[in-house]
Amino acid sequence: MKWGLYATGAIAEAFATDIRKLNGEVIIAAYARNEQKGRLFCEKHNIERFYHDEATFFSDPDIEAVYVSTPHTLHAEVSIKALRAGKHVLCEKPFAMNAKEAKRVIAVALEQKRFVMEALWTLFLPSIQKVFEWIEADRIGAVKVIQANFGFSGNQDPQGRLLNPDLGGGALLDVGIYPVLIANFLAKSTPESISAEVNLTNTGVDGSTFISARYPNGILALLGASIEVNLINNLVIYGEKGRIVVPSFWMANEATCYYDNDVESFVCDEQQRNGYHYETQEVSNAINDGLLQHDLVSHQFTIELMETLDRIRAEIGLVYKQDLNNGFL
Ligand SMILES: NC(=O)c1ccc[n+]([C@@H]2O[C@H](COP(=O)([O-])OP(=O)(O)OC[C@H]3O[C@@H](n4cnc5c(N)ncnc54)[C@H](OP(=O)(O)O)[C@@H]3O)[C@@H](O)[C@H]2O)c1
């Protein structure tokens, strides 16, 4: 696949580093609004074409797929531009600011007959795949309770993307999305009831959000997100016969299953750094197979995840300007 990068920030750096682990995947172009930073990025990663002009980037006929890694507020708009230019799209999380935007992006992808997926890389990691395997094999019996946290003490710049409401700041959309996605994925549904508590920052976004949810199959989830404190960032899945523990689960490098007085651990040695390439390879395979979506992160999964996040935001009273008007839609 010939990739084009829209934006060259921190996560684009990780994407460009990890893609080198794959054969046949190449970044041929990048667009950045800051010419100097963009050119330096291209030099560092041997990217042949740098574009400072967005329209020229999108009209490059050799770019097959675009990786969107701007702050959240631009995800939907940029994805739609790329899809309308005939490109396939892998867009960073959250896929959009709300479910309405997410549905619009997916509608455009289907109209254009182009692949689109939210970059939920966690689900493609070998350690997380192993967790799914253990659950499928009934190691821990029926899942009853899921506990997951992602919290860190982040950059305190009120203008930065973590705290600035105009850039979609806040814990839930930045890191809370991971505990929520893993709970929805494991419960194979969305919550029938949700409650949440919040600490708001001075900028009016959520510094910490704690969620309790009940799923239709009776699974309970306790999920935490923070951009102001370092939480103990484990995923723990409790089943009738045992439990699974995954440290730093969104970037899981290991997992342990406790069952029947036995313990099995899985460590992914080959995941030298990050692990974004597992997702990239899967996206490339799906596009080459002519698919418009990936089974693991289907359009429906992304819409339901966005709807769950919308419901949590309603619980904590967190509104973004994209909720109040149609914005670019
Ligand atoms: N999957 C993961 O593990 C993961 C990890 C981190 C982040 N993310 C997601 O990736 C996205 C970016 O995060 P990040 O940490 O990479 O942020 P970042 O380092 O701030 O990078 C954002 C990039 O977007 C560019 N940008 C900002 N506003 C723009 C605009 N109006 N037009 C064009 N480009 C613009 C920035 O350009 P300048 O350099 O000119 O400001 C920068 O290159 C977020 O949505 C986040 O949720 C995902």
Image (spheres, helix red, strand yellow):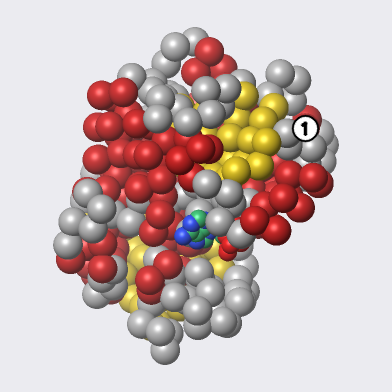
Question: Disc 1 beta carbon < 8 A from ligand 1?
Answer: no
Residue 126 visible to the viewer:
no
Image quarter of residue 170: bottom left
Image quarter of residue 291: top left
Residue annotated with mark 1: 20
For mark 1, give the secondary structure: helix
Question: Residue sitting at 24 percent across and 75 percent down?
Answer: 317
The image position of residue 71, as x and y in percent, is: 48, 59
Question: Residue sitting at 70 percent across and 41 percent down?
Answer: 16
Q: Is residue 246 left or right of residue 85?
A: right
Residue 73 visible to the viewer:
yes
Q: How many marks?
A: 1
Q: Nearer the viewer, residue 300 or 59?
A: 59
Q: Is residue 93 left or right of residue 96?
A: right
The image position of residue 262, as x and y in percent, is: 70, 39
Residue type, mark 1 in image: Arg
Q: Residue furthest top?
A: 289
Question: Residue sitting at 81 percent across and 34 percent down?
Answer: 270
Q: Residue furthest left?
A: 325
User: Where ligand 1 lies, by quadrant?
Assistant: bottom right
Q: Nearer the viewer, residue 242 or 273?
A: 273
The image position of residue 69, as x and y in percent, is: 53, 49
Circle 1: is it few (<14), some (14-19), or many (20+) Cα within 10 Å?
some
Question: Residue sitting at 71 percent across and 18 percent down?
Answer: 24
Q: Residue furthest bottom?
A: 202
Q: Nearer the viewer, residue 28 or 263?
A: 28
Above or below residue 204? Residue 181 is above
Look at the image and tell me in which quarter the N terminus lies.
top right
Above or below residue 276? Residue 177 is below
